[in-house]
Amino acid sequence: MKTQLIIVVTYLVSLGLTKGQNVPPEPTSLSTSPMLAVHSEASNSPYSASLPITTEQSSISHPVRVKNPSAYKNIAFGIYAGLNSTKLKGESTGGDISGRLGYQAGLFVRAGGQFFGQVGAEYFGSSSNYFTKGDGQTVNDIQDKINIHYIQIPAYVGYKLLESDRGISAIRLQVGLEYANRISSSSGQFNLSNSEIKSGTFNGLGQLGFDIGPLLIDLTYHYGLSDTIKNPVTGAAASTGFTGSQRRILSASVGFKF
């Protein structure tokens, strides 16, 4: 009996020792590639979050062109020349505009973007046929050309209705005012002296313009705000008989800006 008890105790002790033994872990099937090995070592580091590993190939990105309005100049200079047709408010033309064509040439500076300002200077020659009531023996005694030459200073504010990305080409609408200073005149049979033609007058301006690259085309209407020819009706001076001598002018010009 004693012998059997010793055998049972010995068996239980040996069984307990077997269960307490450490069993080595089975080898895993993970790849032993250098990339995974580096990742495994990095994951044990406190700085592992700042070292992301990716197996995707990065693509080369090209810079996107962004419009920079400040890179384009906002000041332009220009020159132009063209023809005009002048009518005085009180004249009778009979539908005939022969001999009424004049010409102009000038320069300007323009500053701004879609809204802009423009100021310039121009030489302006205008010609008008004028009929005045009188006791002349022939038609030429009461009708003749009045030619007046001016230096004019036009000033505009404008808005570009349409424009290209760089603002080089555009459709413009402008309004403004000009001062016209008379420098010479002739009046044929009317025999008007320079003293009878005002040395300075003002005109209202309306303009439709087209910029096609460096080329420009302008259509301008000049609306006279005061009489061109003096017409005293009181005092010692006799009346010249020229009523309604405010100028009405339509001009067309072509030019270049740079």
Image: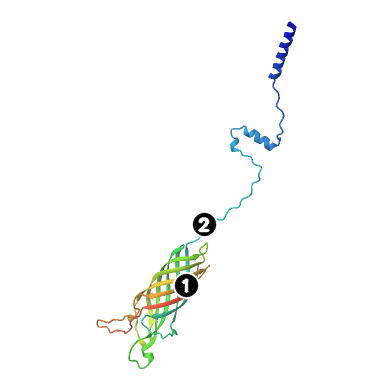
Q: Is residue 6 above or below residue 25?
A: above
Instruction: From the top left corner, tell me how far across and down residue 204 is, in percent.
Output: 38, 72
Instruction: From the top left corner, tell me how far across and down residue 129 is, in percent.
Output: 40, 84
Q: Is residue 28 above or below residue 146?
A: above
**Farthest residue in the bottom direction?**
137
Residue at image point 44% right, 71% down: 207
Identify the secondary structure beneath mark 1: strand
Picture quadrant of residue 238: bottom left
Viewed as shown, does residue 48 lie left or right of 136?
right
**Farthest residue in the left direction?**
235
Mark 2 or 1, nearer chain start: 2
Q: How many marks?
A: 2
Front-lying residue, 32 or 181: 32
Identify the secondary structure beneath mark 2: loop
Badge number at residue 218: 1
Q: Could you tell me if the residues under marks 2 and 1 are in contact, i.e. CB atoms within 8 Å?
A: no
Front-lying residue, 183 or 201: 201
> Of the residues shown, which amino acid type is indicated by label 1?
Asp
Badge number at residue 68: 2
The N terminus - image quarter: top right
Instruction: From the top left corner, tell me how far across and down residue 214 is, in percent.
Output: 52, 68
Instruction: From the top left corner, tell me how far across and down residue 107 is, in percent.
Output: 45, 71
Front-lying residue, 93 or 116: 93
Residue at image point 42% right, 79% down: 125
Front-lying residue, 201 or 98: 98
Viewed as shown, does residue 36 lie left or right of 147?
right
**Farthest residue in the front direction?**
1
Q: Is residue 26 above or below residue 134?
A: above
